[in-house]
Amino acid sequence: MSSSKDSCGDHGRRCERRRWWRRCIGYTLLFLFLVLLAIFITWLVLRPTKPRFYLRHATVNQFNYSGPPSNLLSTVFQVTVSSRNPNDRIGVHYDRLEAYASYRYQQITLRARLTPLYQGHNDVVLWSPVLFGPAIPIAPYLCDAIKGDVASGFLQLSVRLEGRIRWSVGSWDSGRYRLFVDCPAFLTFQNGVSTAEGAIVQFQQPSRCSVEV
C-alpha cells in the first residue's frame, strides 16, 4: 500500500509541474501578443508617412565623353537635395545615405556618402554633395544616346539616393528600412552648346523625387 501511495504522489507532482509550465507558457504568449498588439495599434494610429524628397538644384561642371573605342565619361556634378518629414509625431533617423548620378539606368559617378542625421517632425533638411565620375566606362549601347544628347545640348539624368532609415516615436526606434530615392533632372547645356572642355549646365527648377521605403 505504501508503494502505491508513493506512486500516486509522484504522478500528482508531475501533473502539477505540467500545469505550472502550461500556465507559464500561456502567460508568456499572452504577454508577447499584447506587446505586439500595442505596437501594431500605435503604428496604425501614428500612420508613418515616408519622407518627401526634392531635387532643388543641379550644376554639371564637367561632362566629357571620349567616344569610341574607349567610351569613357568624366563628370562632375553639384546637386542639392532636400527632404521633408511630413509626420506630426514621428521622427526619421537617416543612418546611412549615399548619392550618385545615373544616365539611362547606368551609374556614371562614384557614390558620395551623406552625413547621417535625425529629422524631426515636419523638419526640412538639405544635402549638397559633389558627385564625381572619373573616366567611367559607358556601355556600348549608350554611345549613340550620349552623342545625340551632347549634340542637341539636352541631357536627362537621375540623381539617386540609397540608404537605411529608422522611424522614431519618443524613446522607441523601429528597425532599419531600406530607402531608395530617384530624382529626375532635365538639363540644358549653356547656350545649347557643349564643348570638349565640358559645358556648365544648371538646373534650378525643383523636381519631385520618387521615394520607396
Image (spheres, rainbow, N blue to C red):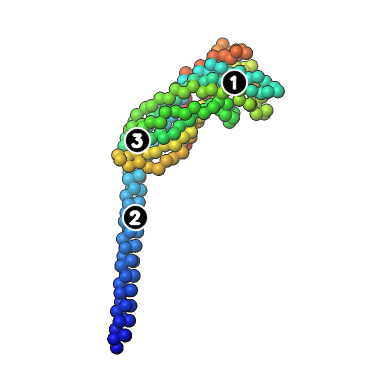
Amino acid type at mark 2 = Leu
C-alpha distance separating marks 3 and 2:
26 Å
C-alpha distance separating marks 3 and 1:
38 Å
The residue singled out by tag 3 in the image is 91
The residue singled out by tag 1 in the image is 74
Indicate which disc residue 32 carries: 2
Q: Are marks 3 and 2 in contact (CB under 8 Å)?
A: no
* Residue 86 vs residue 38, the one in the foreground: 38
Please, is residue 11 above or below residue 143 in the view? below
Q: Rate crowding at label 3 as few (under 14), some (14 to 19) or many (20 or more) other CA atoms within 10 Å.
A: many
Amino acid type at mark 3 = Gly
* Residue 201 vs residue 62, the one in the foreground: 62
On the image, which quarter does residue 7 sit in?
A: bottom left
Residue sitting at 62 percent across and 13 percent down?
A: 196
Viewer-side label of 2, 1: 1
Please, is residue 73 above or below residue 166 in the view? above
151 sits to left or right of 158:
right
Q: Percent x, y for residue 3?
A: 31, 85
Q: Percent x, y for residue 94?
A: 40, 33
Q: Secondary structure at mark 1?
A: strand
Residue sitting at 29 percent across and 79 percent down?
A: 9
Q: Percent x, y for residue 46?
A: 33, 41
Q: Percent x, y for residue 134?
A: 58, 22
